Amino acid sequence: MNKPASVPEQFDVVVAGAGFSGLYMLYRLRQLGLSVKVLESAGDVGGTWYWNRYPGARCDIPTTDYTYSFDPELEKEWTWSEKYATQPEILDYLQFVADRHGLRSDIEFSTTVTSARWDEQENRWRLTTSCGSEIRCRFYIMATGCLSMPKAADIEGAGRFAGQVYFTSRWPHEGVDFTGQRVAVIGTGSSGIQSIPLIARQARELTVFQRTANFSIPAHNGPAPADRLKQLGEDRAGYRHAARWSRGGVPIEPTDVLGGTASEAVRRERFEAAWEQGELFGILNVFADQGVNPAANDIVAEMIREKIRSIVKDPETSEVLCPKDHYFGTKRPCLDTGYFETYNLPHVRLVDLRKQPIASITEEGIETADESFGFDAIVYATGFDAMTGALVAADVAGRDGVSLQEKWAAGPSTYLGLMTAGFPNFFMLTGPGSPSVLSNMTVSIEQHVDWVAECLEGMREAGLETIEPTTLAEAGWNQHVQDCAAITLHPTANSWYMGANVPGKPRVFLPYIGGVNAYRQACDEVASQGYLGFRLTGPGEDRCWDGVIRRMQPDVAMVLEIMAGMGMPPMETLSAADARALMAAAAQTRPPGPEVGEVTDGVIPIPAGDLPYRLYRPAGPPEGPRPLVVYFHGGGWVLGNLDSDDPLCRDLCARSGAVVVSVNYRHAPEVRFPAAAQDAFAAVQWADANAIELGGIPGQLAVAGWSAGANVAAVACQLARDAEGPHISGQLLICPVVDSDMARPSYIENGDGYILTTALMRWFWDHYADPADRGDPRATPLRGDLKGLPSACIVTADFDPLRDEGVAYARALEAAGVPVRLARARGHTHTSVTMVGVVISGAPVRAEIGEALRDFFPAP
Ligand code: N01
């Protein structure tokens, strides 16, 4: 007789993992009255802190912060013994939490989820486990951690070694005694750096194999910091609230000191204070710009190298220990206790794998290109398949049987790091695309768990059964995650943040670097907007408010926030003179733009008087004449001058290799339409006639302009065509004004809040041209004859009221047979693309502009 098939167990929710996130998730789901089962591979709770038992394992966020905040009573009952608690103490803490809330009864230990399949008919997940059981659940939540899947040993011969082999990430529970042994440690990340000093205390000989030198600062461990304890004692709730709304999940005051401009004394003082403090978020906050500006980063990096050189006595060893191949912070910096000092011990040796790579592991030890080493034990501290490893390995398949592994073949794709399209009712806690590893994990974990719990509660109340992100929302979030990373130095490093440590893993920045606070804000907004970007279904219900939660470039958003905080009066409420003074004052504080070869000022004689110009000549070869670009500044025909657009002109010059002549045309309201347009045309005629004197190549002349400057540049092209000369090779129009019609959708969408407003545009027009003149093609070139005009590059910005008229001009030029390149400044405002050295995300757009300018001319 056949054995009857066992009936699968049914739960509302299954959670995989019983570490920090799984335990709290269980607690919250129970509070909601849902039936829950937690499956945990390990023999007990603890997650990371269960497995990583190597000597010296500690957290690298002060334990007063690296702790649950959901239970104030728990906080009172538990006191951390040290600033950075050891692994056994953190494990004790998690066991204490599990006991205190009776969590173990819903956890099945030593059980791994071996597969998860979405059943579309039943709207259920079907799970199988390593114990052979089947489970059905409505929601499946992976709380499997970011650094839980050890990286496979990717070294030739691994497995051949006859001695003892240890992985820091899977350390024996009974501990290891290295006394009298010859020990090798491979890897100098956090795990290696923490364990090496302690292994050195026991081993007879210790040889460390280092592929990449790592930045590390002393932890200065000891009692929990008194100031932190005082703050917590006085206002625990306030402290935790501040942590939740901080950038990294630890409440610190972000500095506004810039490395590039700070005095040597300030630099030194800030660095030494951070070094003494011994905290990651302190050393990452020496300068506001160290994460984005190579020069500022180099200052911190060099000061750390100085420290290493001062600690390590052997100059050759200390040089090998000095990190030089990545910017500080782009690989996770380490906190150590006596790490560099360890290399002063006579029985400790450092092998530089950049000079002598490992050829093979042998039965006796390790062979490099130059030497054979014999060992009794090898310790692999070689890291993890971070952030995606545990998720992808878990054999999860969503709609149509598509697995996570297949879907993420080119890198992870998530909405908010919480869910992924095609996998309904499947949540990831601290998944890729969330702040996770870049933050205090416990704060991020609590935020994710709370968000998921509130989502499930809301669904239950609304009678909804499934939730799943849309592909639009997910693509938007992925883009935002990458945009946030792109303005930092992070993508330059071969880090596990980039997936670069695992051979063959797609190179994608994995966590969200926009900050815990910004991320929480985005998650809250998504929920409060009816779960924007999610499809929710239930009996007779199918609702979806589709959309993208963050479309603006992160640094543009930051600039807008700063400007809003400055409380400046709206420009259109000022007189022209006051508005000009305000612009001039703002220009004082910005970066100067790139160096160019030569900058000279002069005047262009025109019948009405002299027009000032400034000429920028590129640095470096080739000597001799270059193409000429005549540039007209922005400012609504009212504001602006040679200084206002100076950084942009330098940038255009450096990127295009052309001589740029920036012309200050006459301004309204003193001189109104059509003076600016006439001046522009006169300047072009003059530049063409004087090309040789200006260092230009006769016949190779383009015009360019931004905003109202692009307006007069476009008009100059039409006037030159009508006058049958001069010949213009191309027109670069950055966010141009080409029409006076303010009814286009971009005016409706972007007319307020993005610096150039509808009200300001009206103010500009009123200063410049009478209503009766505004239909004149010399004011609104879109209304002119567009045949026979020079090739154009038109740049439009997403958050610009003028966006649609720029597009309209491009379309109209194309229709008239003019070759057009339309460059979209994604996520930018009218002004942000021009903010050289301030808005880093504008650089790729300006690179495209430089290329377009070069394309106007024959190749040199
Ligand atoms: O791993 P890692 P980890 N041949 O990837 C080297 C957290 N954590 O376990 O840089 C030779 O950082 C590799 O070299 P390279 C923390 O977030 C926290 O140390 O790839 N060498 C690197 O030196 C941390 O960042 C704490 O060139 C090889 C090392 O192995 C993260 O976990 C403690 C190699 C791996 O360093 C991971 O840290 C511990 C090979 N084939 C961990 N493959 C605290 O809270 C790899 N390496 C303090």
Image: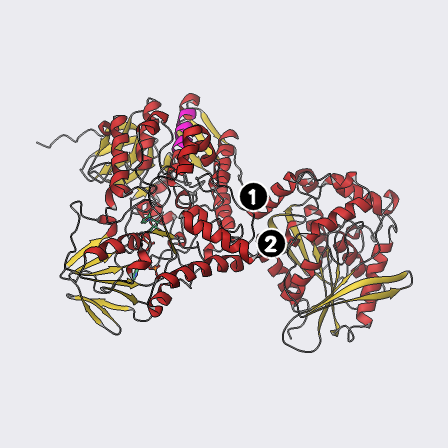
N-terminal-most mark, 1 or 2: 1
Q: Which residue is pictured at 78% across the width and 38% down the height?
A: 573
- Across and down, in percent, residue 174 comes to 15, 45
- Across and down, in percent, residue 591 comes to 64, 56
Q: Quadrant of ligand 1?
A: bottom left
Q: Which residue is pictured at 30% across the width and 71% down the height?
A: 356
Q: Nearer the viewer, residue 329 or 855?
A: 329
Q: Which residue is mark 2?
A: 842
Q: Nearer the viewer, residue 564 or 36?
A: 564
Magenta residues, start to end? 449-458
The answer to whether any part of residue 357 appears in the image is yes
Principal secondary structure, stretch drawn in magenta: helix
Magenta stretch contains residue 450: yes
Magenta stretch contains residue 261: no
Q: Secondary structure at mark 1?
A: loop
Q: Quadrant of the C terminus?
A: bottom right
Q: Which residue is mark 1?
A: 551
89 sits left or right of 541 in the view:
left
Q: Secondary structure at mark 2?
A: helix
Query: Disc 2 residue type?
Result: Gly
562 sits left or right of 606 in the view:
left
